[in-house]
Amino acid sequence: MIDVVYFAWVRERIGLPREQVATRAATVNDLIAELRAREERYELAFSDISALRVAVDQTLTDFDAPLAGVREVAFFPPMTGG
Amino acid sequence: MDIRVQDGAFDGGAELNAFTARASGAGAIVSFSGLVRDVTDGLVAMTIEHYPGMTEKALEDIAQQAATRWALADVMVIHRYGRLAVGEPIMMVATAAPHRADAFSAAEFLMDYLKSRAPFWKKEETDNRADWVTAKDADEDALKRW
């Protein structure tokens, strides 16, 4: 089980802040493919990966990052702090 | 190092005075404050969302990088989240160093990095709509100079 967390418009589009996902996905890209296949709201949220960023266990990473041993994956748009 | 992520308001003047008192031997102190500005016509408020846990880690990491690159006596970062009205302070950074060049550079570095590497997202609210602020290419490009 991996905790999948969403922020900003990704959270709004999917309609959830967080969910537990039973997955054997090897990488973030594989997890995204599984989520996109679920329902249209996921397909919409993940339709343009270039508009998204990903953090694995609260560290920014790339979409090809491996998921072995990972507890939490977060998807969100580019950050706008400051 | 003093890193704070909070929903409550802060008094920038009092914070700067306290920071200055702690770093009194440093010689140079630079501070920056960011306020909610009325960018869009009729902005009513700005709501800032963040990623509890990762936000603190990211800010500490950015401050640590600054402390490695420049000779700093102290660093402070305060960043708010939640719903803020126009004119309210969103965040502030302060750096203390023996020399002003280090204090200025470190403060700019902190700002550039926390804009695009700390997990905050802003939503602007007007009378009839609310839109997520889009990240600017210029913000990402600003990281390349460091």
Image: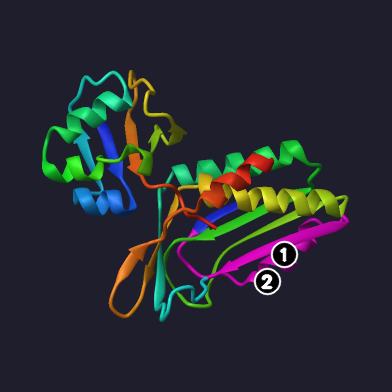
What chain is tagged by disc 1? B
Q: Which mark is residue B8?
A: none
Q: How many marks?
A: 2
Q: Tag 1: residue type? A: Ala
Circles 2 and 1: CB distance less than 8 Å?
Answer: yes
What chain is tagged by disc 2? B
Give percent across and percent down for residue B107.
70, 53
Does any portion of residue B12 appear in the rendered image?
Answer: yes
Q: Disc 2 and disc 1: Cα gap in Å?
A: 6 Å
- Please give the name of the residue rendered at 32% of the width and 29% of the height, measured from the top-left corner: A71
Give percent across and percent down for residue B34.
59, 66
Residue assigned mark 1: B18
Image quadrant where one finds the N terminus of chain A:
top left
Residue assigned mark 2: B14
Relative vertical location of residue A39 with respect to residue B20 in this rendering, above or below? above
Q: Which residues are magenta?
A: B6-35
